Image: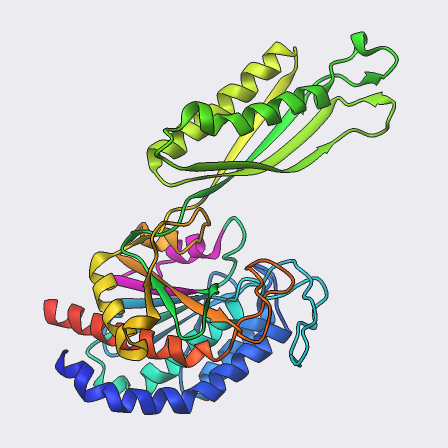
Amino acid sequence: MSVVWTSLNQRLDQTIKATTPLAVDVRRQLHQYPELGWKEHKTQAFLTETLEKQGLKPRVAAKTGLIVDIGTGTPSVLYRADIDALPIGEQPKEGISFGSKHEGVMHACGHDMHSAIGVGLALTMHELSETLPGAVRFMFQPAEEIIPSGAEQMVNEGVLEGIEYALALHVDPHRTTGNVGVRDGLLTATSDTYRIHLRGKAGHSARPHLAKDAILLAADVIRALYSLVGQRIDPLDAAVINVGLIEGGSAENIIAGNVNLTGVVRTMRRETREKMHDGIRNTVASLAKAYDCEADIEIQLGSSPIHNDPILHTILQQAARHVLGEDGVHPIEKPSTGAEDFGRISDVVPSYMMRLGVKCEDLPFAGLHTPNFFADENAIPVAMGIMSRTILQTLSLTANRG
């Protein structure tokens, strides 16, 4: 254990204990007033006010995001927290007095927790700033849930300039509070959105021979898309495709001339990503030709995979075991086909994302992106304890190497 770690350990625990009530208040405020991606204006204002009251100097980034630097010199370590919510109506929960006040919007992915932990960590590092072995940058990122994403915008604006390592966490309702998931290497998948516009010729349902039925074409396109994985991808590889939105038709007795299909394709490797994209384009074009119709195909690149860095894996595991003991630290056996735009940061600098257990023992299980999801705020000091130690050790690593 390093000198920095040993000398700051007791003070760190005291600071986290003192800071946790404010972090919990931040979580509750954000939970009550969630905002969608690129619309987080009040969230940004609230976080700015909170940080400034504690003597920090946040600056605006990516329209509705924030950056705050703590320590001396150019920051070498970045900590990311996302701030946006989802268009999901929250199901009221017995005993919870701070449910969402914005109809149809809630923090169903736990970004209120991520932001609160980010604030708590920033205040903890600020309290210890005179003894930090370097500087850390906190990134409060908008629009994680949508494309174009906030991570892309903040990277384009230079948030990673001088950064050597990046850290983040994500709440995990499959794990109870006091447990975390860790993984070395690939953690998440890509997530790319495709949009297909099929153009036939509208007509009367009594005279189908005079029309070109775009709905009939769409039915075959959908079947073909779902067969792509089995036809083109190695069974030992991984890919997922879905059709999530179908738009077409105007009346029950009219043959539709236009149909729009929208969906997502997820992969683990660059080569697989390219195979699936080519498969979508070729399959749709061939079927459209067979039906004497036309097709426009757009594929929008989304999140890159997160690759957890082995050095950060070692550092974070050590920190987690210090806080939770061996029994609270669990290896994640397989990567997830879910996606996270922290992958954009992972593209540029060595990065690490931890899974934080937040399941409330007194509430039924509810997954992410569901109306019943709710994260246990007792996980906030757990996360602060692990991540503050990881930040300090990583700062020490970069300082010693410099």
In this rendered view, identify the residue nearer to me: 105 or 130.
105
308 w.r.t. 56: above or below? above
Q: Which quarter of the image is occupied by the N terminus?
A: bottom left
Q: Is residue 153 magenta?
A: yes
Quarter occupied by residue 19:
bottom left
Q: Position of residue 23 (x, y in %)?
A: 47, 82
Q: Position of residue 61 (x, y in %)?
A: 45, 64
Q: Position of residue 160 (x, y in %)?
A: 31, 60
Residue 50 shows in this picture:
yes
- Numbered marks: total: 0
Residue found at x 60% / y 29%: 196
Q: Position of residue 361 (x, y in %)?
A: 53, 74
384 w.r.t. 309: above or below? below
Q: Which quarter of the image is occupied by the C terminus?
A: bottom left
Task: Please give left or right for residue 10 compared with residue 256 in the image.
Answer: left
Q: Residue furthest left?
A: 401
Residue found at x 23% / y 81%: 132
Residue found at x 46% / y 84%: 52
Residue 164 shows in this picture:
no
Quarter occupied by residue 17:
bottom left
Question: What segment is highlighted magenta in the picture?
Answer: 149-170
In this rendered view, identify the residue nearer to me: 76 or 187.
187
Q: Residue furthest top?
A: 209
Residue found at x 27% / y 74%: 321
Scheme of image coloration: rainbow
Q: Is residue 32 magenta?
A: no
